[in-house]
Image (cartoon, grey):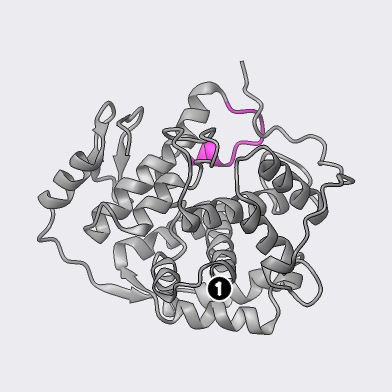
Amino acid sequence: MALLELEFPVHTLDNHCLLAQGSTLDLETLNALIESSREDRYPESDLSRYGSVTKDTRSFLKEPPYDKIFGDPQIKTVLDTMQRVSLPLPVMEYLDYFQNSDVYTYRHSIIVYALSIILDNDLLEDKDAQYLMAKTGPSHDFGKNCTPLSVLKKETPLTRNERAMLEHHVAAGYVIMGYYLKDADCLSAELARDHHERKDGSGYPTGIPLEDRQTEIIAVSDVYDALISKRPYREISYDNRTALEEITRMAERGEIGWEVLQALIGFNREGRPHYAEVKVSLEKRGTPPTKNVYGITAE
């Protein structure tokens, strides 16, 4: 990975500072942090039995438009997968933090994870790759614990500094997941770090071309749910057609690949066809919601 200079510190839920503001973050730095706590041991918890995760997953996936994407077989696939996921208890506690402090991020984390599971089954033929993706759990945004809640919940445009605080979550998530899982190269850490990168190099934090299919699946799932779900920064969510058109524009610009888009559209169509059978319409008839301040910078 490219070098990153942290604009803000990375801390755990109990405010233990892992890396200070101004630290240079690279693989060597994270490995040194991991080695410094290599002897620390944490009890593990099963995802499906943790808190109200299973009940909440069922509830979230029955809400429109996810009720169209997730029929009973797809929900069963998600819940069966969750039964095979076990993570260190300090990682699971991030779900408690967001459930209690920022329900948007809590719901978003679970839905993006569920959506990635069914897209994986369509797009990843390698069962080992599917298993690795399943093991990550709903952790791609856990670095947002390092973003002030006032920024996460802000309804008006973010300042440049607040935008930097928000974007800091990818580096923070990389550090946190690598630290607790004792592996800087684990998929959970890489997904947290790279899910805002794009295939054309237009993303962040480092602007590297996104080449990993698993990360691309999380990236597309992340954008899709952000568009169609409630958010503090807009009064009305995108309707489903307009959201898919926005992601189609991303494919047209080369930010994401067509196959992941095809798979997402396939699950939105009658019969849920395999992605290889899906033809993407380039016609744009949707209307984005008004009073949406996302991407607008306050002076």
Name the residue furthest front.
276
Which part of the image, by quadrant, shows the C terminus?
A: top right
Q: Is residue 129 left or right of residue 178?
A: right
| Relative vertical location of residue 45 with respect to residue 3 in this rendering, above or below | below
Instruction: Decide whether residue 113 is among the magenta residues.
Output: no
Region of the chain picked out in magenta, as a range: 149-158
Task: Return the x and y of residue 145 as percentages of the image width and height.
Answer: 41, 47
One can see residue 12 in this view = no
Which part of the image, by quadrant, shows the N terminus?
A: top left
Q: Badge 1 is on which residue?
A: 121
Task: Return the x and y of residue 87 as percentages of the image width and height.
Answer: 33, 69
Q: Is residue 10 left or right of residue 137?
A: left
Tell me the residue at 48%/53% (across/down).
Answer: 215
Q: What secondary structure is marked by label 1? A: helix
Q: Quadrant of residue 262?
A: bottom right
Q: Quadrant of residue 134?
A: bottom left
Q: Is residue 74 left or right of residue 170?
A: right
